[in-house]
Amino acid sequence: MTPTQFTFSSAFVLGLAGLVFHRTHLLSALLCLEGMMLSLFIALSLWALQLDATGYSASPMLLLAFSACEASAGLALLVATARTHGTDRLQNLSLLQC
């Protein structure tokens, strides 16, 4: 494993660990997801550049588009949650309550 691959793999694992172990606020969970998507985007871009394949050059842009959609949906959920519940703490959210 090259140092570049190790760096992006460890960035993804750190984002995943932050998502699993530090889930107190919705905003921190969204930031961990964005960090994971950013590390995947950079790793996929470097992988497409290293292979010199034109077929793989569209996949980082597709991942970036999905990441932007995920971020906008997450921010919309954050605003809706803050308006209805008054906080973004994940412990206060329940699907059984209306």
Image (cartoon, rainbow, N blue to C red):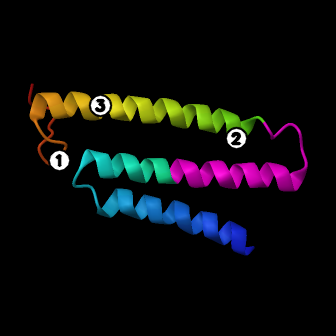
- Specify whether 55 is left or right of 80: right
Residue assigned mark 1: 89
Q: How far apart are the two marked residues, 3 and 2, measured between alpha carbons?
A: 25 Å
Amino acid found under the numbered disc labelled 3: Leu
Q: How far apart are the two marked residues, 1 and 3, measured between alpha carbons?
A: 12 Å
Question: Contact, CB < 8 Å: mark 3 with mark 2?
Answer: no
Residue assigned mark 3: 77
Q: Is residue 41 magenta?
A: yes
Q: Of the two numbered discs 1 and 3 on the same chain, state the one appearing first in sequence.
A: 3
Question: Contact, CB < 8 Å: mark 1 with mark 2?
Answer: no
* Residue 23 on image: x %, y %: 27, 55
Magenta stretch: helix, strand or loop mostly? helix
Q: How far apart are the two marked residues, 1 and 2, measured between alpha carbons?
A: 32 Å
Q: Which residues are magenta?
A: 36-57
* Residue 96 on image: x %, y %: 11, 31
Amino acid found under the numbered disc labelled 1: Arg
Amino acid found under the numbered disc labelled 2: Pro
Relative to 13, residue 90 above or below: above
Q: Is residue 52 magenta?
A: yes
Crowd tier of the residue under label 2, counting other residues whose Cα lies within 10 Å: few below 14, some 14–19, many 20 or above: some
- Specify whether 3 is left or right of 77: right
Q: The residue tagged with tag 1: helix, strand or loop?
A: loop
